Amino acid sequence: MIFDTGAVIGFEKGKRKVAALVANAVLTGAPKIYVPTVVVAEAWRGGARSARQALLLAGCRIEPLNEEVARRAGEALAAVRGATTVDAVVAACAHALGLPLVTSDMNHMRPLAAHFDGLALIAI
């Protein structure tokens, strides 16, 4: 699965549903949780505030933005009214990797999931 910014912040704030997803991934030996670099940039503030984020990120695969995903995100921005760049990049990344997207913002992600046909969403 791939985490958006809301999922990373949800873990930082101790949201039970996010903690359960992380614990289940660890306990079952499921593939790593992916976090796009743009999510790190949007969520990270450093210092003590980011201590829990650092713990989460240490066990995740940080997925860099490549040109193909960037172009797909740009196409999504053209097609989905009101979409933000970070959300479009996260959705394009999830689609490219074939992973479900964990999000706290279903209202913004549903139209992007529709654009990226077959993109599964997990609400937190």
Image (spheres, helix red, strand yellow):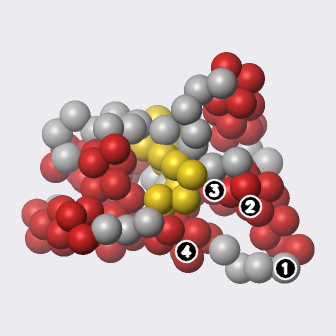
Quadrant of res 21: top right
Q: Nearer the viewer, residue 46 or 121?
A: 46
In terms of secondary structure, where does tag 1 sit? loop
- Residue 120 x %, y %: 34, 34
- Which residue sits furthest top? 28
Q: CA distance from mark 4 to mark 1?
A: 15 Å
Q: Which amino acid type corresponds to the residue marked 1 in the rendered image? A: Gly
In terms of secondary structure, where does tag 2 sit? helix
Q: Which mark is residue 31?
A: none
One can see residue 13 in this view: no
Residue on which disc 4 sits: 42
Residue on which disc 2 sits: 53
Q: CA distance from mark 4 to mark 2?
A: 12 Å
User: Mark 3 and mark 2 in contact (Cβ < 8 Å)?
Assistant: yes
Instruction: Name the residue rendered at 57%, 43% in the picture.
Output: 33
Q: Is residue 8 left or right of residue 38?
A: right
Q: CA distance from mark 1 to mark 3?
A: 16 Å
Q: Which amino acid type corresponds to the residue marked 4 in the rendered image? A: Glu
Residue on which disc 1 sits: 47
39 over 23 or under it: above or below: below
Instruction: Name the residue rendered at 38%, 58% in the picture.
Output: 90
Q: Which amino acid type corresponds to the residue marked 3 in the rendered image? A: Val
Q: Earlier in the sequence, mark 4 or mark 2?
A: 4
